[in-house]
């Protein structure tokens, strides 16, 4: 199975999680393309991928703001329509539910189908759990 992982945010736990889930997915025999959403980055077509994972850290406590680079990148991506997606966040003390809801809303506005969502608390356990959803 081919999957893409799109993420944004300067967070050490997020970087560790991306590396961990990449190794878990590839160990299970799947192909994964990791994409860091950056300003000026050319938005890729997600048509060749069967699954898309999208994540970011929680950056605001009350409003659930998403990183602007991630929003811009997702809006420019083609091929998210009817795509199975997983949304994940790196939580803080508060603001987690609102951020996760906003991320899922962004993906659903592009026509994707959310099959799972997660607040990443334990990198090893959660990477195994999300990787098992790729079917």
Image (cartoon, rainbow, N blue to C red):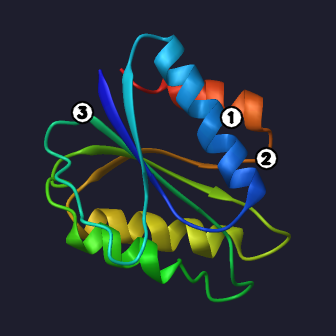
Please tell me which of labels 1 and 2 falls first in the chain.
2
Q: Quadrant of the C terminus?
A: top left
Q: CA distance from mark 1 to mark 3?
A: 20 Å
Q: Is residue 126 above or below residue 103?
A: above
At mark 2, the secondary structure is loop
Report the Cα–Cα distance between label 1 and label 2: 7 Å
Residue 17 vertical placement versus 50 (above, below): below
Residue at 25% x, 66% y: name it.
42
Which residue matches tag 3?
50
Indicate left or right for 88 with 48 as reference: right
Residue that extends furthest to the bottom in the rendered view of this protein? 63
The x and y percentages for residue 88 are 56, 52
Which residue sits at x=50%, y=23%?
25
Q: In the displayed structure, does residue 67 sit left or right of residue 113?
A: right
Crowding around mark 3 (Cα neighbors within 10 Å: few <14, some 14 to 19, many 20+) is some
- Tag 2: Cα neighbours inside 10 Å, few (<14), some, or many (≥20)? some
Q: Residue at x 61, y 75 (%)?
A: 98
Residue 38, x across and y down, in percent: 43, 70
- Residue marked by disc 2: 121
Give the percent coordinates (x, y) of residue 104.
Answer: 43, 63
Residue at (86, 70) in percent of width and height: 93
């Amino acid at each position: 199975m081919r999957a893409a992982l799109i993420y944004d945010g300067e967070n050490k736990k997020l970087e560790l999680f991306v590396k961990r889930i990449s190794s878990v997915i590839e160990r299970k025999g799947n192909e994964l393309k990791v994409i860091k959403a950056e300003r000026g980055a050319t938005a890729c077509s997600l048509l060749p991928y069967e699954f898309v994972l999208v994540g970011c850290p929680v950056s605001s406590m009350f409003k659930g703001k998403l990183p602007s680079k991630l929003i811009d990148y997702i809006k420019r991506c083609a091929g998210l329509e009817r795509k199975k997606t997983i949304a994940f966040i790196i939580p803080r003390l508060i603001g987690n539910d609102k951020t996760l809801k906003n991320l899922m809303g962004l993906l659903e506005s592009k026509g994707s189908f959310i099959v799972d969502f997660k607040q990443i608390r334990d990198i090893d356990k959660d990477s195994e759990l999300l990787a098992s959803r790729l079917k």
